[in-house]
Amino acid sequence: MHQYQETLTALALVAAGAVDRLQRRGYCERTTRAAGESHGQRTLRAGTPAGKEPHMSDSGKGGVMWLPEPEAKDYPAAADYLSLLAPDDVAAAIAASLQGAPIQHRKAKDILRAARLVLLPPDNAHVASDLKKIRDGRKLSPILMVRGDLAKGIPAQIADGYHRVCASYLTDENTDIPLKLADAPR
């Protein structure tokens, strides 16, 4: 039992150190401890520098605002990424399919899970850039995805917009993200 308590204490100290690092970088704020709270317990608002509230989305459901359609440059970027996974003609066909796809909405946490991708940290240069856009009230481009295959265990692919998904998740994991979704040729 004593070793278990030592392990828990060590984990609490590590967590407190991580919180302190996040506070120094401005991604959470210190709060006063309520009665019964331990030293390491603090309220965090990931992705929102202390003292700055996120801007509301067009729907009023979160801190991220979105363009109505992906930017034109996103489709060639998606094709370029997909060409690492499939021949150029297949990648181009998927990118063309994405252009004609309707906008759908999914939560940031579900997109990362379906793609089996890790959340990039707020100090990643591209994520930090998107977090700044969110704080400044600038609209982000919807993401482009290729559907996975559950039966075959193939994850979905974020063809364009991984950093935007991570920045949105850091603002609120339940952020409603507009996306275009295409099926890969089977």
Image (cartoon, rainbow, N blue to C red):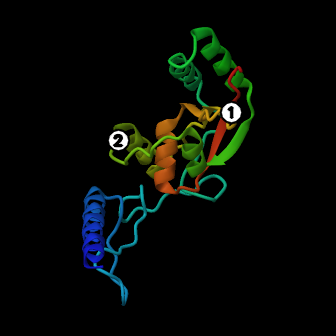
* Residue kind at label 1, given as amino acid type: Leu
Examine the rendered structure and indicate whether residue 93 appears above or below residue 127: above
Image coordinates for residue 162, horizontal then vertical, percent? 50, 37
Q: Helix, strand or loop at disc 2? A: loop
Camera-side residue of 136 and 167: 167
Marked residue nearer the N-terminal end (2 or 1): 2
Q: Quadrant of the C terminus?
A: top right
The image quadrant that residue 39 belongs to is: bottom left
Q: Quadrant of the N terminus?
A: bottom left
* Side of 162 where 30 appears, left or right: left
Residue shown at 61%/35% (left/top)? 156
The image quadrant that residue 10 belongs to is: bottom left
The residue carrying mark 1 is: 181
* Residue kind at label 2, given as amino acid type: Asn
Image coordinates for residue 132, horizontal then vertical, percent? 41, 47
Pointers 2 and 1 in contact (CB under 8 A)?
A: no
* Side of 12 where 43 appears, left or right: right
Mark 2 is surrounded, within 10 Å at the Cα level, by few (under 14), some (14 to 19) or many (20 or more) other residues, namely: few
Camera-side residue of 81 and 67: 81
The residue carrying mark 2 is: 124
The furthest residue to the front: 1
Mark 1 is surrounded, within 10 Å at the Cα level, by few (under 14), some (14 to 19) or many (20 or more) other residues, namely: many
Image coordinates for residue 144, horizontal then vertical, percent? 61, 32
The image quadrant that residue 47 belongs to is: bottom left
- Cα separation, mark 2 vs mark 1, equals 26 Å
